[in-house]
Each structure stands twice: as C-alpha cells, then as structure tokens.
Amino acid sequence: MSLRITALTDPEQTSAGRRLAWLASAPDGTPAGYAFLRLFAGEDRGHLAEVDVQVHPAERRARAGGLLLDAAVAAARRDGRSTVTAQAAAGTPGAAFLLARGFRAALALTYARLPLAEADLPALTALVGSPHTGYRLTAWEGTVPDELADSFVASRRAMDDMPMGDLDYGTVVWDLDRVRAAAAAVAARGDVLHTVAAVDRASGAVVGFTELAVPGSGTGDAQHYGTAVLPEHRGRGLARWMKAASITAARARHPRLGGLLTDTADNNPYMRRVNDGLGYLPTHTAHTYRLDL
C-alpha cells in the first residue's frame, strides 16, 4: 500500500516550545497514523526534540511508522537539534520499533497508581496532621496566589537536579508567566490543578510543592505532576507530608475519583520510597529512548 505523509499545521506554541505534526494516510484518505514533534525552547534546551509516533494497529507493518519517524527526525535535524527522545512501555511493539530505528534506552520510569478506595485514610490523615518543626502546609487550586507567587516560582529550581538517567533535558527556566501559563493550560482542557506546598515558617517562602491534575468530571484517575523540595530543606519528610495532604484533599473534594497516577525514575529511590510508603502500586515500566543526530 502506498502511503502519503502530510505535514499539518499545529497551532500549539508556548514559552516551552512549539510542535510540528504529520499525518500518514492511504490513497483513499484513510488515516493510518500520526506523528508529533515537540521542539523545546530555551537557551539550555535548544538541542532537544521529542517525538510521538502512533499508528493504528490495523495499519502496522505497512511502513507508516517508519515514514512518520523519518519525517520527524528530518525536521529535528533541519532545526539544529542534536537529540530526539521518545517514550514507550517496556516490551511493547513501540519499544521494539524505536530500538530497531537506532534509539537507545536512556531512562527507566516506574508508573504506579494509588487506588483511592484502598488508601489508608486514617494513617494519611495522621501524617498530614503531624508536626514538621519550622514548616506549615498550604494549598490552592489553579494558579498560585499572589502572596506566594515569587517564592513558588523560586521553588521550581527544586526540579533542576531531578535524576534523569542518560538524558540531558537541560534546565527549565521558570518565571511567573510560565507558572501561570501552565495552570491556564490545565484549566483550558477542563481539569483542576491542585497544589500543596510546604512553607518555611521563618521566611514565609515556599520550599517544596506537589501538583495533581484532577479531571474536571471528578471521575477516573488524577495525574500527579512534579513533587520536589529545595535541596536545603530535604531530609525532613516534606515530600511525603505534602503528597499525603494531596491524597487526602483529592479524596475529600472528589469522592468519585478512582485513583492517583504517578511516575518516577528508577534512579530516584527517595521518591520511589515515598510512593511505596503511601500505598502506590506499580503498574508498568516504560523507557525514555534517545536518538543522537
């Protein structure tokens, strides 16, 4: 079967970067698959692109995936990118496809889920109420309150040393506009962004945070985003404290919610211990693959 690859116009462009898109279709116009290529922005991320190729199962083994990937990689090379990444679950056709096309595994991720019906709410509530000398918890929905905005933006550097295996994701530079844009993007798709933060009582500054995106319907599974603590405040159990508060709040505000999803790099044993201790159960492993251009 002769396939046609068509470049599409993707209007998505943010301070984080822009996206290119392609569609694979049969001669009669039937879609067979698509590819998205994210070109990251920023002085420290101009080398990086991320590709997502999806082919309908009925259309596989007809070269659609290879043609789409070729188009995306060529575009990344034209844009001066030196690394293209992609993700696939371990043992899947997607993983085999990437390896066959020259990608190599660079980071292993463990995905886990906390079934809220099975969560130990009394224990979690007790943990939330336990004192952490010198700190207090606060929380908000949507964008950060003005009085915490500056220190919350500053606290985002807690993610800079996140274990990333054999990947160079550069440093994401956060400012208030970017923080607000991220919250607005969650709201625009109809979801609720719930943030719990640890505040240093002495300075009044945010020193750690955890974020949870809850479906607007209040059903299904919510997705954890970043959880991080500034290096100078680590070792005090703040990540576990904040995440317990996020779990209990989600259970109270969204009683029809099924579970909470998270993923953690295998070379981040501290956060894996936090998740294991709170009752998250591993569901599968995935890898981020890289292709050097």
Image (cartoon, rainbow, N blue to C red):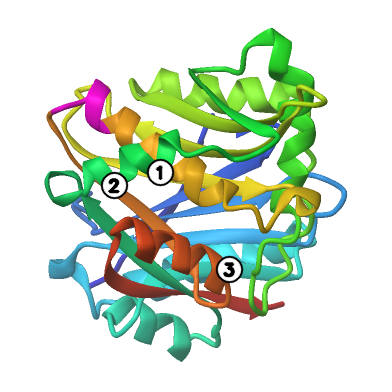
Q: Say which residue appears at 34% left-offset and 81% top-offset.
A: 90
Kindly identify which residue carries mark 2.
123
Give the magenta part as a residue range: 251-255
Looking at numbered disc 1 in the image, what kind of residue is underneath it? Leu
| 206 magenta-colored | no
Q: Say which residue appears at 63% left-offset and 66% top-offset.
A: 74
Chain-order first, disc 2 or disc 3: 3
* Alpha carbon separation for disc pair 2 and 1: 6 Å
Q: Is mark 2 in CB contact (under 8 Å) with mark 1?
A: yes
Q: Where is residue 204? Give x, y as percent.
A: 76, 22
User: What is the secondary structure assignment of the residue under circle 3?
Assistant: strand
User: What is the secondary structure assignment of the residue under circle 1?
Assistant: helix
Looking at numbered disc 3 in the image, what kind of residue is underneath it? Thr
Q: Where is residue 98? Give x, y as percent.
A: 45, 81
* Alpha carbon separation for disc pair 2 and 3: 40 Å
- Is residue 172 visible to us here? no
| Label drawn at residue 105 | none
Q: Toward the viewer: 45 or 9?
A: 45
Kindly identify which residue carries mark 3.
85
Per the picture, the main secondary structure of the magenta-coloured stretch is: helix
Chain-order first, disc 1 or disc 3: 3
The picture quadrant where one finds residue 243 is top left
